[in-house]
Image (tube, helix red, strand yellow):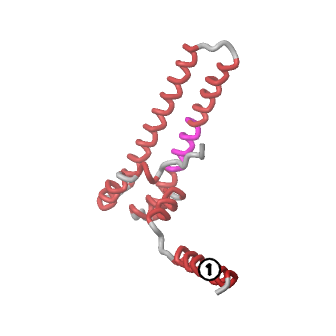
Amino acid sequence: MTKATVYFISIIGLVLFNLILVGILVTKPNTKQNQEIETIQNPKMVVIERLKFDENQIKQYVKLIDTHNIVIKEKDAEIARTKQQLYKLLSGNLMINKADSLTSVIGEIQKEIEMLHFDHFKDIKKLCNEKQQIKFEQLSIEISKIFERELPPQ
């Protein structure tokens, strides 16, 4: 066998292997990792599907989400403004007391945000009937994973 024949057979083998691998990946059912990605992309639908909300509950849930998002965006903007004030201190006379005060304000706003999230989930729980309450208890174990924000790469 010549070197060219060996190379040719090797290349054909690698191409076939790659085609088989691609075929497996394309036809493979959703894995746990794919389901987690879908969950992160649309947590609202996860809650609706898992709790099996009816049309009326869905409307109320969407209103809760809209209100919650408005308040959270305001708090996020408040944090951004406070951080801007904090980092402006770097350009002038560094005032440690002022920096400490601003970081405390940021911490308080973040605490408010977490309580808003907690209250939001309590409101969602109030939408549930008895059967859904049980499902909500199961869902509550996964809430932090379902609603986590994807952090930008560093």
Q: Nearer the viewer, residue 43 or 133?
A: 43
For the stretch drawn in magenta, what is the main secondary structure?
helix
Q: Determine the secondary structure under disc 1.
A: helix
Q: Disc 1 marks which amino acid? A: Ser
Q: How many marks?
A: 1
Q: Nearer the viewer, residue 141 or 75?
A: 141
Residue 32 relative to residue 136: left or right: right
**Residue shown at 47%/64% (left/top)?**
35
User: What is the x, y in percent for residue 12?
Assistant: 63, 82
Quarter of the image for residue 83 reads top right
User: What is the x, y in percent for residue 101?
Assistant: 53, 18
Q: Nearer the viewer, residue 42 or 27?
A: 27
The 10 Å Cα crowd at callout 1, few under 14, some 14 to 19, many 20 or more, is: few
The quarter of the picture where the C terminus appears is top right
The relative height of residue 54 versus residue 97 in the rendered view (above or below) is: below
Name the residue that disc number 1 marks: 10
User: What is the x, y in percent for residue 64?
Assistant: 49, 49
**Residue shown at 61%/32% (left/top)?**
80
Residue 46 relative to residue 7: left or right: left
User: What is the x, y in percent for residue 22?
Assistant: 58, 75
Residue 83 relative to residue 109: left or right: right
**Residue shown at 51%/55% (left/top)?**
62
Outermost bottom residue:
1
Outermost front residue:
1
The relative height of residue 13 versus residue 101 in the rendered view (above or below) is: below
The relative height of residue 45 versus residue 111 in the rendered view (above or below) is: below
Quarter of the image for residue 14 reads bottom right
The quarter of the picture where the N terminus appears is bottom right
Q: State which region is magenta.
A: 65-75
Q: Is 71 in the magenta? A: yes
